């Protein structure tokens, strides 16, 4: 189905900071930072009504029902952010542990949303934790203030124009590669903070105005994460090509 402006988009932000006895204090910080970014012109000027938080207990069945309901309601584009506990399934597929303890695999999400363009960003582990604490205190979210009515309109139009070009696909940007542990601090996850920091740097730089796909800020963030983790955490991205990639950043 051809999408037209304005595109009906939905952002689902999932945070699971507790699992067993393991607490990740930076998860809630990351969710709030991502929400601030999305609502700014730089993030595409998402309206608050388009953003849904899931940080309390939810079963896998309820989460799956939410996805199917969003499809039935005619949403054209899905942005999913997951921060918190995760691991690899026995088939080496990323698995996300939902608030409450149930888990869902990336392939299950892909199958449900197979007819939609999807960008999923995950700041979670994909292996057995064997990691030294470190991290970065990045306050980049403060740079993403709410825009004026005109700025928001321009950002929404530019963002939606790129969304209209996307075929059904799931692009998955992860804080780690298979078998690695994602670093978390009180300030937030190393990858999420680096990704938003990269967006802030692009906004402040002399680079061209326009809409940037997820790959460019991801690449900058990945280099920072690899450096700060001494090579032990290597962000990855897949599910895109040279022609199509989901928009992520708007520079007016």
Image (cartoon, rainbow, N blue to C red):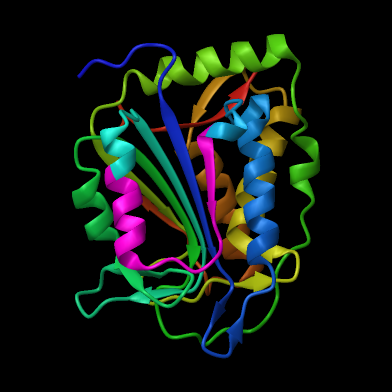
- The residue furthest bottom is 21
Assess whether residue 238 is covered by the magenta stretch.
Answer: no
Report the residue at 56% width, 63% height from top.
226
| Viewer can see residue 190 | yes
Residue at (49%, 73%) from the top-left corner? 85
Work out whether 160 lies above or below 115: above
Quadrant where the C terminus lies? top right
Rendering quarter of residue 97: bottom left
- What residue is rendered at 41% in x and 20% in y? 7
Q: Does residue 210 sit above or below 138 in this rendering?
A: above
In magenta, the rendered stretch is 50-68
- Relative to residue 249, is residue 189 depicted above or below? below
The answer to whether residue 248 is above or below residue 152 is below
Front-lying residue, 67 or 42: 67
In which quadrant of the rendered view does residue 24 lie? bottom right
Residue at 63% x, 43% y is: 35
Q: Nearer the viewer, residue 54 or 96?
A: 54
Magenta stretch holds residue 51: yes
Where is residue 192? Give x, y as percent: 60, 55
């Amino acid at each position: 189905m051809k999408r037209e402006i304005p595109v009906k988009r939905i952002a689902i932000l999932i945070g699971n900071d507790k699992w067993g006895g393991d607490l990740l204090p930076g998860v809630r910080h990351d969710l709030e930072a991502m929400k601030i970014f999305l609502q700014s012109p730089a993030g595409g000027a998402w309206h608050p009504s388009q953003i849904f938080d899931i940080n309390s207990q939810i079963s896998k069945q309820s989460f799956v029902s939410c996805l199917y309901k969003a499809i039935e309601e005619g949403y054209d584009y899905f942005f999913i952010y997951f921060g918190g506990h995760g691991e690899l399934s026995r088939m080496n597929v990323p698995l996300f542990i939902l608030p409450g303890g149930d888990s869902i695999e990336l392939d299950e999400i892909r199958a449900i949303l197979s007819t939609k363009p999807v960008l999923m960003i995950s700041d979670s582990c994909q292996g057995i934790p064997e990691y030294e604490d470190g991290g970065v205190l990045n306050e980049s979210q403060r740079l993403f203030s709410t825009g004026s009515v005109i700025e928001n309109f321009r950002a929404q139009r530019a963002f939606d124009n790129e969304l209209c070009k996307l075929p059904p696909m799931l692009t998955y940007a992860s804080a780690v590669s298979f078998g690695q542990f994602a670093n978390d601090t009180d300030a937030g996850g190393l990858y999420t903070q680096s990704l938003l920091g990269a967006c802030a740097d692009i906004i402040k730089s002399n680079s061209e105005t326009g809409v940037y796909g997820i790959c460019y800020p991801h690449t900058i963030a990945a280099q920072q994460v690899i450096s700060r983790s001494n090579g032990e955490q290597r962000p990855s991205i897949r599910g895109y090509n040279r022609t199509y990639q989901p928009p992520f950043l708007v520079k007016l």
